[in-house]
Amino acid sequence: RSIGRRIVTALGKSDKLTYKQLAKEANTSKSSAFRQVKGIQRRNVYPESVLWEHEEGV
């Protein structure tokens, strides 16, 4: 979850990052950044998923 939060934070700053830049910003590997972004995209299908990425939803 902490990697996911770092990814969301980095994407909040700029949605034009490459996976390499995103991984560097979130301090993780490119493959992990890719998997996290794909997971976020899958979760965004559900309206309540925005709560899954924030403390209020935990």
Image (cartoon, grey):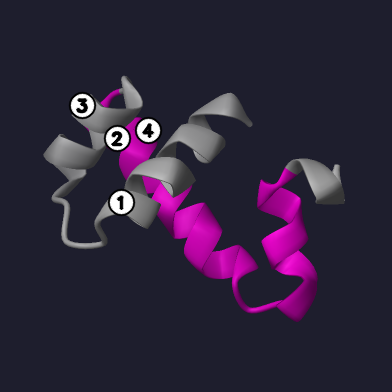
**Tag shown at residue 32:** 4
* Residue 35 percent coordinates (x, y): 42, 45
What's the residue at 76%, 58% (across, down)? Answer: 51
Total residue callouts: 4
Q: Nearer the viewer, residue 7 or 40?
A: 7
**Tag shown at residue 31:** 2
- The reply, left or right, for residue 35 in relation to residue 19 is right
- Marks 2 and 1, how far apart in space? 20 Å
Foreground mark, 1 or 3, reads 1
Above or below, 23 relative to 10: above
Question: What secondary structure is found at the residue carrying circle 3?
Answer: helix
Taking the magenta stretch, the answer to whether it contains residue 43 is yes
Dot 2 or dot 3: first in sequence order is 3
Label 2 crowd (10 A; few <14 / some 14-19 / many >=20) = few
Taking the magenta stretch, the answer to whether it contains residue 47 is yes
Which kind of residue does numbered mark 3 sit on?
Answer: Lys
